[in-house]
Amino acid sequence: MNVDAPVAERAGAPAPAPMGPVKEDRQRSWWGRHGRRTTVWSLRVALLLAFLGLWQLAHGFVSNPMFISNPIAIGDQLGVWLGDGTLVFHTWITVQEVAAGYTIGVVTGALLGFALASVHLIYDVFEPFMMALGSAARTGDT
């Protein structure tokens, strides 16, 4: 017998129930587990179809295709470009150009920043222009 145990436990009484909320496994249906996700994706698909349908209707009412293009013709052309590899080829060229532009911008910015920090005369010349550009209104920033 443990002398340090509470009196009720030494007497053979059952231990008290744990305090706090009881955790039980909930048995939810498939809809209970996936209903919101299914609803969101269904609404997204419906919105896309409504947009494409309104676009096709707008194309039918406008006589000049220079103003509103035909979405079916665009889909057909995308299919052709996917089939012959044109879209993949040009997408890869665009990715390479973005990477090259980013690299050139980072290297140029780092070198100019180093020059501005190292040569005080350059900093003194460019400082008012940098302050003016820094305080100008930015568009697209959040």
Image (cartoon, helix red, strand yellow):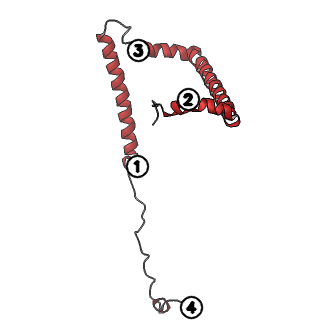
Q: Where is residue 51 in the image (x, y as percent from the top left)?
A: 35, 24
Instruction: Look at label 4 and name its amino acid.
Output: Asn
**Alpha-carbon span between mark 2 and mark 3:** 50 Å
The three-letter amino acid code for the residue at tag 1 is: Arg
Q: Which of 132 and 109 is in front in this view?
A: 132
Q: Is mark 3 on a helix, strand or loop?
A: helix
Tell me the residue at 58%/14% (across/down): 86
Q: From mark 3 to mark 1, how far is it between C-alphas?
A: 37 Å
4 vs 2, front mark: 2
Residue visible at 43% across and 61% down in the picture: 25
Task: Please rate how many residues cluster around mark 1, counting C-alpha atoms within 10 Å: few if below 14, some from 14 to 19, many from 20.
Answer: few
Q: Name the residue under label 3.
A: 72
**Left or right of 26: which side holds 129?**
right
Q: Is residue 123 above or below residue 17?
A: above
Task: Name the residue type under label 2.
Answer: Phe
Is the Cβ of the residue at disc 2 closer than 8 Å to that at disc 3?
no
* First along the sequence among labels 4 and 3: 4
On the image, numbered disc 1 is attached to which residue? 33
User: Where's residue 111, x and y in %?
Assistant: 69, 31
